[in-house]
């Protein structure tokens, strides 16, 4: 399952950012994941619940926003969208040219973290 190492690295980043911001608890983490990464959101959620206990992110939710795939054609230069299923065999719908430059779909970024700060430190 290729999600686990990524979820672990997201976890490390989230904890570092949250602690840096003086968080007492993490409530929510928003992730943007391109569809070409082939992630299964349920697995990401499951791994999150598996690695967060004992940390300030215990009990937090993880929200996944999927980003669609698009490419710019190597032939006519137009931009088109395609699905995960078409990935192995991408053709421009306008001119039929095979392949192109991937513009989106391989993202993986932490879009936002919702934290609770310790009031005593204010
Ligand atoms: Zn084209």
Image (cartoon, helix red, strand yellow):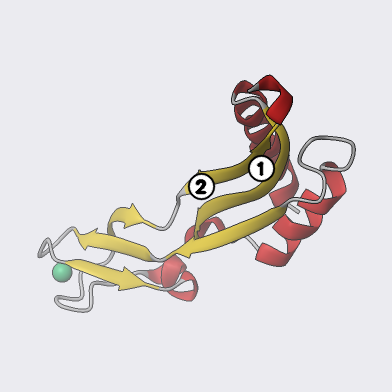
Question: In this rendering, is residue 60 above or below 25?
Answer: below
Q: Which mark is residue 108?
A: 2
104 relative position to 73: left or right: right
Where residue 31 sits: x, y (%)?
Answer: 55, 51
User: As drawn, which residue projects farthest toward the bottom?
Assistant: 93
Question: Mark 1 — residue?
Answer: 6
The residue sitting at the right extreme is 54
Work out whether residue 77 or residue 39 is closer to the camera in this orientation and state it.
39
* Mark 2 and mark 1: Cα distance apart in space: 9 Å
Where residue 68 sits: x, y (%)?
41, 66
Answer with left or right where residue 51 lies relative to residue 10.
Answer: right
Q: Residues within 10 Å of mark 1 (few under 14, many from 20)?
A: few
Q: Who's the residue at 49% across and 60% down the image?
A: 36
Task: State which quadrant residue 69 falls in.
Answer: bottom left
Q: Is residue 94 left or right of residue 108?
A: left
Left or right of 96? Residue 122 is right
Q: Residue at x 89, y 36 (%)?
A: 54
**Mark closer to the chain start, 2 or 1:** 1
Quarter of the image where one finds residue 13: top right
Give the number of the disc on residue 44: none
Give the image location of residue 8, x and y in percent: 73, 38
* Badge 2: residue crowd in 10 Å (few <14, some 14–19, many ≥20): some
Image quarter for ligand 1 equals: bottom left
Please report the residue visible at 21 percent of the width from the left and 59 percent of the height from the top: 72
Quadrant occupied by the N terminus: bottom right
Q: Secondary structure at mark 2?
A: strand
* Circle 1 SS class: helix
- Are dots 2 and 1 in contact, CB under 8 Å? yes
């Amino acid at each position: 399952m290729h999600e686990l190492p990524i979820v672990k690295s997201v976890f490390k980043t989230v904890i570092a950012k949250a602690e840096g911001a003086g968080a007492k608890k993490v409530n929510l983490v928003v992730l943007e994941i391109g569809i070409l990464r082939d992630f299964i959101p349920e697995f990401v959620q499951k791994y999150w619940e598996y690695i967060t206990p004992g940390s300030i992110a215990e009990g937090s939710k993880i929200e996944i926003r999927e980003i669609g795939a698009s490419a710019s054609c190597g032939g006519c230069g137009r931009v088109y969208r395609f699905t995960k299923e078409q990935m192995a065999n991408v053709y421009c719908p306008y001119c039929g040219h095979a392949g192109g430059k991937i513009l989106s779909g391989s993202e993986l970024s932490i879009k936002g973290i919702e934290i609770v700060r310790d009031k005593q430190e204010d």
